[in-house]
Amino acid sequence: MVDLDTLVDGIDSLPMLPQSSAKLVSMLNDRDIDMSEIAEIVRTDDALSMVVMRYANSAAFGTRGRTFDLRESVVRLGSEALLKLVLEQQVGSVFTGGCQAFELGRQSIWRGSIGGAVAAESIASLHHPDVKDLCFVAGLVRDVGKLVLDRKYGADYAKSVFNEMTNGRTFTDAERLAFGTDHAEVGAALCSHWGLPVQIVNAVMYHHSPPAAENGGNPITDIVHAADIIALWSGIGIGADGMQHELASHVKLSLKLSRKAAEKEIASMWSKVGAIEAALGINGSEVGRSAA
């Protein structure tokens, strides 16, 4: 069985949220930040600097005939857009190599990640706009535990889990029987290790099994759970766990996720994923949509 603390302590090599990005995430969650300090940190990461300037000078943010330097770009984007951009850039740098532990091909896990993020943001905008940015980030990192388990076990992870897939067990039940933990719990432990807000840690922990409000549930967890299901229904990021996960009935009711509403979210998600891939210089044609 896996010792969760030992597993998390041993994966600092995972190339996501390096020190500069972790500090940025922490600072950008503070509404009273000094954008000059943010610019100095961004300057230390060449790749992030280029992405920030590309966004700020794009048609969506820029002004015709004017080019913004790095500091001006940071100020122009603002803390909320920059927080999402930092996480997009860092997740994009690691979620592109496939994940044998969950039978996910090249960049499939990236699309699953970003698809869940934009779906969570969209759903939150309708029901709880005050937490839409936290929902975006939680949706983005909800499956990071899969990468940790892939680093540790590779393809052997899926084989061991499949051996426990009997008697109608869920995939996460089979994970726990085979390893004493599951990808959601591992992902939550890693997010906690990185110092991400507790709301994000909890949303990652329960993104497949959100508790009802009377049992300690909360809107962020419900929204991230719904976004995960929306991504799966769209055919994005389907791996070894396939369509094993179902939409919790209390979440369906509270978020009014009818078939029509779900179809609208799926269409919106695909459009936004394409736009983000274009902005980050990711060739979507190399990825291809997963088959549902």
Image (cartoon, rainbow, N blue to C red):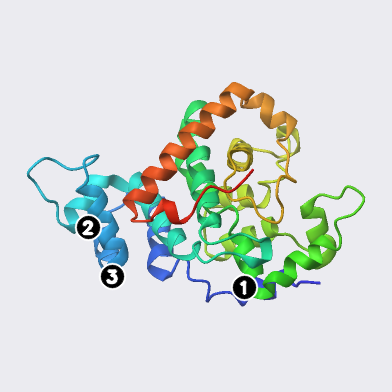
Is label 1 in a helix, a strand or a loop?
A: helix
Q: Nearer the viewer, residue 290 or 131?
A: 290
Q: Residues within 10 Å of mark 1 (few under 14, many from 20)?
A: some
Q: Which of label 3 and label 2 is nearer to you?
A: 3
- The disc placed on residue 89 is none
Q: How crowded is mark 3: few (under 14 residues within 10 Å), some or many (20 or more)?
A: few
Sequence order check, earlier mark of 3 and 2: 2
Q: What residue type is labelled 2?
A: Ser
Q: Is residue 151 above or below residue 233?
A: below
- Quadrant of res 190: bottom right
- Mark 2, Cα crowd under 10 Å, few <14 / some 14-19 / many 20+, is few
The residue positioned 62% from the left and 73% from the top of the image is 151
User: In percent of the image, x 42 and y 70: which residue is there?
Assistant: 19
Residue 75 pos. (x, y %):
22, 49
Against 157, residue 81 (above or below) is above
Left or right of 259: which side holds 22?
A: left
Label 3, label 2: how far apart the Cα atoms are: 13 Å
Number of numbered discs: 3
Q: Nearer the viewer, residue 36 or 149?
A: 149
Task: Give the labeled residue for mark 3.
Answer: 44
The quarter of the displayed image where residue 89 is located: bottom left
Q: Mark 2 points at which residue?
A: 36
Q: What residue type is labelled 1?
A: Arg
Please name which of the two marks, 2 or 1, marks the residue nearer to the observer: 1
Instruction: Give me the C-alpha separation between circle 3 and circle 1.
Output: 27 Å
Q: Circle 2 — which element?
A: helix
What kind of element bears circle 3?
Answer: loop
Classify 40 as above or below 124: below
Pointer 1 residue:
151
Residue 37 in view, yes or no? no
Of the image marks 3 and 1, the number of the one nearer the N terminus? 3
